[in-house]
Image: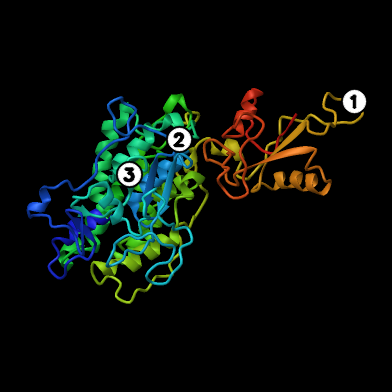
Amino acid sequence: MARFLASLLTHRKQAHSRMVHLIRGVLHAGNAPRTDSFQQSVTDFRSRVSSNESSQFKPESGRYHLVVALPCPFAHRALIMRSLKGLQDAITVDYVTPELTLEHGWVFSPTSKSGIDYPSCTRERSGLEPKAECLYQLYQKGNPEFTGTISVPVLWDKKEQTVVNNDSGQIMEMLNSEFDEISQDSSCPDLFPKELQAEITELNDYMADNITVGVYKCGFAQSQEQYETLCKKLFDDLDKLEKRLDGQRYLIPYYPGGRATPCPTLADYRLFTTLIRFDIAYYLLFKTNLRHIRDYPNLQGFLEDLYSDPAIASTVDFAQIKNGYWMSMNLHSPLNPKDRIPLNSEPFLPKGPFQRRMLGLAEHGGKPAADGTVKGAEEKSKGAFVRKESQHRNWIKADGSTTFTPEAGRYHLYIANGCPWCHRTALARALLGMQDSVSMDVLFYSRDPDRGWQFKPEAPGCTPDTVNGGMRFIRELYEKENSAEKTVSPAQA
């Protein structure tokens, strides 16, 4: 985000930019010069993590560190990939304060210049000694002669004490493919498959120029005429994406490994990080106000579909997105002269049944009907929620009439705190004082839309699987029994 604002504001006639930059390692206010001799210096870090023998940066658990700003859509891309690929333990992360500062740019502090506290923001933990107070100090350490704007995301090498890469697209690709050997979630497929790379890249380039950058072009237009032209162009391109998603779940049909359900690609997540910010930031601040995203049924459904994945939702902080944009824009131009943060809501206002998950299912073709429902959905629910009966109905009995007899330490419960049926069994176990007799693991409260109940031990109140080899999803337990069921709470002997 910082790098793009720099390119826009270079051409503004009314005021200079106030985003910090380095010239040969020395801090200056404003953006780096773009036309003088300093432009010949290396302005970006473009190294790659690779398992190739010749690579300086090998994929190693604990070696790399991400620095992100939660308001920034470009930094958000890297954070999403880290979460999807289960790299939370392998790659540490710092969250800079969401409000840019005039003197130092991005800073490491849980308290902002406005006095707002951000508990999730962290002190610098990159291994730098002495510890950095500002992001530009990592750039100085990585290259004492660096010339350029200080931007996020940053992929930092704690071992070599240098910046590996600060390009969000390249960081996404590296996290997608280069850390598979140390990933905690082997179920996440390749999101940039070779056979689709050309199509994904072409679509990414189109969306970058017309959507992701398009909102900024509107916000920083230099005249009314230019603004109107750019705004109409932006919504023409949103209309095209709305039409593209009519009848298909994601931007590009992709069925890895013969899966029956379609899978997102890098292109979907790049679009997500712009759409999630649109209604709560761009609509008012950048005056991209011909329509909300929630006025587009397919784009809004697409947004909700991806957000329903806990791995994605955990990377979104609506408060920091709003505060970051509305409190930082005055460093560049008087878009919000009184530092007022609007009270508009989060961007999800569902207007009807959520049907997008049915799109693309191989069993019924995934084509929506005229009423907005999807063929095949009615066979599954008959218009109302029906909880299926469990296929497993064995009883534990003390009279010896079954093979399951009550024995301390023999049985184990799997529950999810978000499930009322699970809650019943957990209550009974606690009330009867059976904590020592029947062990228990707690799954994440929200189901993955495609893979069902999942273990997320990093989430508060959740545990890893402790008895079946560290499963990631409860469906793995049922698959061992050749069962298609995916529910909780199973008790296992």
- Classify the position of the N terminus by image quarter: bottom left
Disc on the earlier residue, 1 or 3: 3
Taking 380 as reference, is 105 above or below it?
below
Residue drawn 31% across and 27% down?
Answer: 194
Residue 444's x, y, as percent? 59, 44
> Which residue is denoted by mark 1 in the rendering?
400
Q: Secondary structure at mark 3?
A: loop
Taking 361 as reference, is 23 above or below it?
below
Residue 240's x, y, as percent? 29, 46
Q: Secondary structure at mark 2?
A: loop
Quarter location, residue 395? top right
Is 490 situated left or right of 78 in this image?
A: right
Is 272 situated left or right of 479 in this image?
A: left
Label disc, if present, on residue 161 of the rendered structure? 3
Residue 33's x, y, as percent? 13, 57
> Which residue is denoted by mark 2 in the rendering?
366
Question: Residue 484: in sight, yes or no?
Answer: no
Q: Residue furthest right?
A: 399
